[in-house]
Image (cartoon, rainbow, N blue to C red):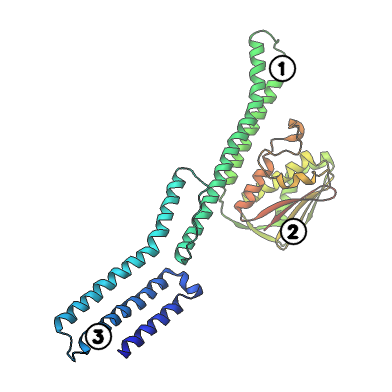
Amino acid sequence: MAVSIFLLLLSVVIALLLLHKTLRKRLSVRIAALLLVVGPVALTIIIIFNAVAYGWLNLPAPWWLRLIQTLIVIVGTSLILGVLATRFVTKPLNQFYEAIASLRASNYQTKLKLTGVREFDRVFGEFNELVSRLHQEEELRKNLISDTSHELNTPLAVMAAQLTAMQEGVLPVTKSRIHQLVMQTDRLTELTTRLNEYTKARSAAAAKETINFYEFCGELRDMFVVQFEEKHIDFNIKVPTSYTIRASRQSLQSIMVNLTQNTLRYSNGKTITIVITENKITFSDDGQGVPNESLPYLFERFYRVDASRNRQTGGLGLGLAIVQELIEAQGWRVHAEDNQPGLRIIIDL
């Protein structure tokens, strides 16, 4: 009797210790605690029953009763453990199944509640993060379709109106109108080319290599030397001659070319400077800059600082979006700051 009571108390103490704080968050620990508690409890109940039923008669329990009791302990313990362990598992799995069914119905607002069990919470946390990313991707897809439709509609509407008018004889066919149609065609061609670049940038996964960044910047300067001379722009490279960077050469070239083209087209400045620090590339100019309220949105698709959406000053609004996609594909981050005067693009490596 004393031994059974001691085993019971010991099992309870061990179970409480296992279920304490962080340990109780593990499913395996909870099941182990059940094993430690249920078995000794059942055994203690049988011992007490025998002591009460046969002790006062001073008779030992018959062998067949001991056999039945042993079977009851084995079967009963298994059933109790099965029911309790199943309760730990089925409730989170039911929640998981309902969330998957909701996701299959394109409901990206669903979230799994944490259960307090470490094994499940790790999976549920990953699932919630995946749902958030899918929701973001869906929003980006819808916005891309909407923005692209808007961008395509303007030149197509102009071309359709002029061609219809010329076909019906309302407007004469002149060199000026043909030139306008050619300009709209060029705009459509540029838009489709940029969209193709943007799509490739989003899926960019080119292999990285070690690049001498000083030599790379020299190649970039040589690429635009004619434009720099025409606009009287000084291209300053403040990079140690031995500095190297791990990146995809093709992606890095697209990033720096887009930044340079963007500066040449819109900044109206006279200096472009590239500075490298330990974990940062700074690309800056001394031009007109952009309003502070526009800085957070510069890298969004089709965003233009010029609200009038003028083709000559507004561009397509895809250059910096391509830059951001390429930068993030390298595992980096980018943001823009006021350079006073001009604009400063900072790439955190």
Between circles 3 and 1, the one closer to the viewer is: 3
Q: Which residue is mark 3?
A: 52
Image quadrant for the N terminus?
A: bottom left
Q: Identify the residue position indicated by label 1 in the image.
A: 177
What is the CA distance from the residue labelled 3 to the residue labelled 1? 110 Å
**Residue 279 located left or right of residue 131:** right
| Residue at image point 29% right, 80% down | 45
Q: Quadrant of residue 164?
A: top right
User: Residue flagged by tag 3: what amino acid is it?
Assistant: Val
Give the spatial CA distance, label 2 vs label 3.
Answer: 86 Å
Crowding at label 3, few (<14), some or many (≥20) Cα neighbours within 10 Å?
A: few
Residue 61, image x and y in percent?
Answer: 18, 85
Disc 1 element: helix
In primary-sequence order, the first of circles 2 and 3 is 3
Q: Nearer the viewer, mark 2 or mark 3?
A: 3
- Tell me where residue 16 appears, x and y as whole percent: 44, 78
Q: Which mark is residue 276?
A: 2
CA–CA distance in space, label 1 to label 2: 49 Å
Label 3 element class: helix
Question: Which amino acid is tagged 1?
Answer: Arg
Identity of the residue furthest to the front in this view: 56
For this orientation, the residue located farthest to the top is 169
Mark 2 touching mark 3, by CB under 8 A? no
Q: Earlier in the sequence, mark 3 or mark 1?
A: 3
- The quadrant of the image that shows the C terminus is bottom right
The picture places residue 122, in percent across and down from the top left corner, at 49, 62
Work out whether residue 226 can be spotted. Answer: no
- Cβ–Cβ under 8 Å for marks 3 and 1: no
